[in-house]
Image (cartoon, rainbow, N blue to C red):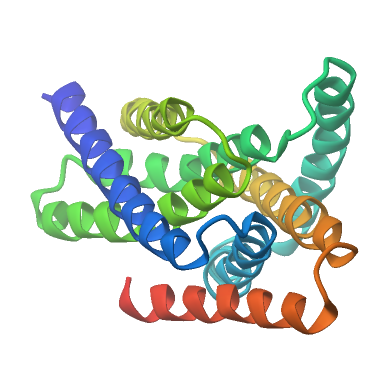
Amino acid sequence: MMKLNALILGGFLFSSVSIGGGIAWLVAKVFRSFNEGLALLCGGFLVGLLALDIIPSAFSVYKSPGIILGVLIGYIFLLLMNKSLHSSGQHKPSVYVLTIALCIHTIPLSLTIGNLLGDSTFAVSITTSTILHHIPEGFALTSVFLSQGQKIKGLFLCFISLSICFSAFIWIGDHVNLSIKAQSVLLGVSIGMIAITSIKEFILPNVRIVPNWMVIVFVLIGYLLSVVFHLLF
């Protein structure tokens, strides 16, 4: 029964990120082939996602030393990963980095859900939070793929990976109690990777290409979209 519930929630997550992806596709239609603008918008959206949701939630639940340690680990991991991908001829590593960061970000939530899944009192709230909480993540990932001209099947593989990771750690959460310190470090790793990716991969490279006023406008639009998502979801 536990495996079935974990799989069902993984399916809900897939539906959630797919909804976010659909919204991103509609937004991308407005900008058509302006990939630099879409990348800046995605960067602003990720900054807003961190500032409004992920970072406040992290510091309200976990202690700061573990989160800061995780951010440092995430930064080092990102440097090593970028070096490896660039040396192998991959010049757009942000897709993979963001997917890994979002997978890591789901782990503390998945473990918590795993601990609560046997309690029917939380069934409705768990299902609702699973569906709504991951719509912005689907929006962010899809924006990255569209701005970099990646194939759509790669996006669905990322969505499936997120769902599998989510389901797997729900199952683990029902059987293993991961310490609060370990969870805080994991969350810090995801924060570091998302923050660095949003600035280094999406915003800074386009500052030299797009006029300054357009950089400000697109980043601000992305940030305001994250505000809307934060208020609605």
Q: Position of residue 131 (x, y in %)?
A: 25, 54
- Up the image or down, 119 lies above or below 92; here it is below
Q: Quadrant of the N terminus?
A: top left
152 sits left or right of 206 in the view = left
- Up the image or down, 189 lies above or below 122; here it is above
Return the residue nearer the eye: 35 or 219: 35
1 sits left or right of 6 in the view = left
Q: Quadrant of the C terminus?
A: bottom left
- Up the image or down, 102 lies above or below 206; here it is above
30 sits left or right of 52 in the view = left
146 sits left or right of 130 in the view = right
Q: Residue at the location (54% across, 42% down)? A: 145
Return the residue nearer the eye: 140 or 117: 140
Name the quadrant containing residue 202: bottom right
| Residue positioned most to the top | 88
**Exactly how many numbered labels are in the figure?**
0
Q: Residue at the location (32% across, 53% down)? A: 22
- Up the image or down, 201 lies above or below 84; here it is below
Return the residue nearer the eye: 109 or 77: 77
Q: Position of residue 102 (x, y in %)?
A: 54, 44
Q: Residue at the location (58% across, 48% down)? A: 144
Q: Position of residue 175 (x, y in %)?
A: 34, 26
